[in-house]
Image (cartoon, rainbow, N blue to C red):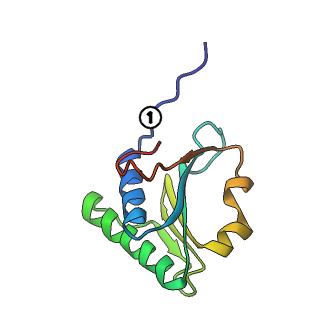
Amino acid sequence: MPKRKAPLKQEPLINTVIEAMKDKKAGNPVILDFRPLHLAVWDTFTICHGTSRTQVAAIADHVMEEVKKKHGIDPWHKEGFENAEWILIDYSDVVVHIFQEERRKFYNLEQLWADAEMIPIDSTDSKKPQ
């Protein structure tokens, strides 16, 4: 009998991240679920892109503000704010990647980590991953 996949334990945090991304009109948000991979250090990546440095920085700032407001936590680590081409915000099990669109295409994390399950975000349902 196949093993039933447990719900994401960080779902409330992930939902807050996705909502914050959507608030700032982030492009093509997706979740990569690494839980089935035995040696993964994190549970999920949440990935999106913006069309300019300004938008990428605004998305990142809004994600951190909303997570702090709703969950009371700060990132464990963050980087990339200097040039805002690729900002990484690390909440331990949930790692947020916010790219400029060209950088996202170049690094193509979705393909690089193709072993993870990709969960697209339905833009019509603002509360839950699809």
**Secondary structure of residue under mark 1:** loop
Which residue shows up at 54% across the image and 64% down it?
48
Name the residue that disc number 1 marks.
Answer: 7
Which residue shows up at 40% across the image and 59% down it?
17
The image quarter containing residue 21 is: bottom left
Which residue shows up at 29% across the image and 57% down it?
71
Decide which of 51, 16 is in the foreground and name it: 51
| 54 with respect to 127 (left or right) | right
| Picture coordinates of residue 123, whole percent (x, y) | 44, 53
Instruction: Specify few, some or many for label 1: CA neighbours under 10 Å numbering under 14, 14-19, or 20 or more.
Output: few
The N terminus lies in quadrant: top right
Query: The residue under label 1 is which amino acid type?
Result: Pro
| Picture coordinates of residue 27, whole percent (x, y) | 53, 65
How many numbered callouts? 1
| Picture coordinates of residue 117, whole percent (x, y) | 62, 42
Which residue shows up at 36% across the image and 66% down it?
23
| Picture coordinates of residue 112, whole percent (x, y) | 74, 55
